Image (spheres, rainbow, N blue to C red):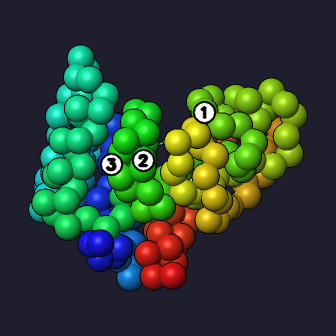
């Protein structure tokens, strides 16, 4: 098994959590940024920063075939832990088993509440006084693996999904590097 402190971060978009993981890396090293969207804005930042990147458009590619290629690239870089950071793609059972117990994700709700999308709108709609974010182990069931850490964020009167998202995102950027460091060194 590769060193768990060698981390590969997978993104599909802006990559603000990727950036937090790289900038606050402590007890682990971000070795590779991977993406299923070659145009993901986060890739630009990673390249400017001198991080190694790998990107391939997953559109139209058979799921497991894509995942096998991704897995090979992660192996080539001797990645020991995969951190999903806004990776908008459900991984194949093959991939999840291959990397079992070595994939983590950040999710913008207090799991087990609000798995899936639109978490902030759902929290507001439900009248929750508190929302937040969770780092969890990735299993085959969506957003359902062991929760490794959470941060609560108060829902303020008048909050919209966008305003709540901003505050939760700031909490994500603190929580994710801290929990990842604990996870890879446990
Ligand atoms: C974050 O809200 C994260 O919790 C969710 O996807 C979003 C990614 O944002 N999994 P970013 O690309 O890290 O800025």
For disc 1, does the CB lie below 8 Å from ligand 1? no
Q: Is residue 143 above or below residue 106?
A: above
Number of numbered discs present?
Answer: 3
Q: Is residue 147 above or below residue 4?
A: above
User: With 61 as the anchor, is 92 left or right in this view?
Assistant: right
User: With 52 as the anchor, is 120 left or right in this view?
Assistant: right
Q: Secondary structure at mark 1?
A: loop
**Which callout, 3 or 1, points at the residue further toward the start of the chain?**
3
Query: Residue at label 3?
Result: 10
Residue 54 seen in the figure = yes
Q: Residue at x 44, y 75 (%)?
A: 184
Query: Residue at label 2?
Result: 96
**Which callout, 3 or 2, points at the residue further toward the start of the chain?**
3
Tell me where residue 45 appears, x and y as whole percent: 22, 51
Q: Residue at x 20, y 67 (%)?
A: 78
Q: Residue at x 23, y 34 (%)?
A: 66
Q: Quick one: label 2, few (<14), some, or many (20+) residues within 10 Å?
A: some
Q: Which of the pair 163/6 is nearer the observer?
A: 6
Query: Residue at label 1?
Result: 116
Tell which tag, 2 or 1, sits nearer the viewer: 2
Q: Quadrant of residue 92?
A: top left
Tell me where residue 156 appears, x and y as whole percent: 79, 44
Tell me where residue 108 appears, x and y as whole percent: 61, 45
Q: Secondary structure at mark 2?
A: helix
Residue 46 seen in the figure = no
**Which callout, 2 or 1, points at the residue further toward the start of the chain?**
2
Q: Which of the pair 172/5 is nearer the observer?
A: 5
Q: Quick one: label 3, few (<14), some, or many (20+) residues within 10 Å?
A: many
Q: Secondary structure at mark 3?
A: strand
Q: Quadrant of residue 26?
A: bottom left
Tell which tag, 3 or 2, sits nearer the viewer: 2
Spatial CA distance of label 3 from label 1 is 18 Å
């Amino acid at each position: 098994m590769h060193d768990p402190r060698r981390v590969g971060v997978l993104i599909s978009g802006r990559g603000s959590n990727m950036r937090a993981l790289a900038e606050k890396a402590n007890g682990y090293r971000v070795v590779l940024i991977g993406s299923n969207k070659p145009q993901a804005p986060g890739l630009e930042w990673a390249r400017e920063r001198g991080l190694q990147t790998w990107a391939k458009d997953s559109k139209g590619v058979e799921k497991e075939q894509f995942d096998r290629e991704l897995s090979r690239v992660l192996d080539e870089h001797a990645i020991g832990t995969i951190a999903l950071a806004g990776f908008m793609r459900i991984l194949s059972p093959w991939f999840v088993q291959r990397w079992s117990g070595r994939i983590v994700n950040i999710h913008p709700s207090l799991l087990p509440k609000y798995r899936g999308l639109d978490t902030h709108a759902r929290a507001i709609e439900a009248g929750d006084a508190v929302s937040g974010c969770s780092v969890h182990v990735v299993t085959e069931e969506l957003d359902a693996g062991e929760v490794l850490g959470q941060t609560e964020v108060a829902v303020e009167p008048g909050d919209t999904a966008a305003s709540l998202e901003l505050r939760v995102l700031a909490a994500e950027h603190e929580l994710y590097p801290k929990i990842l460091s604990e996870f890879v060194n446990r």
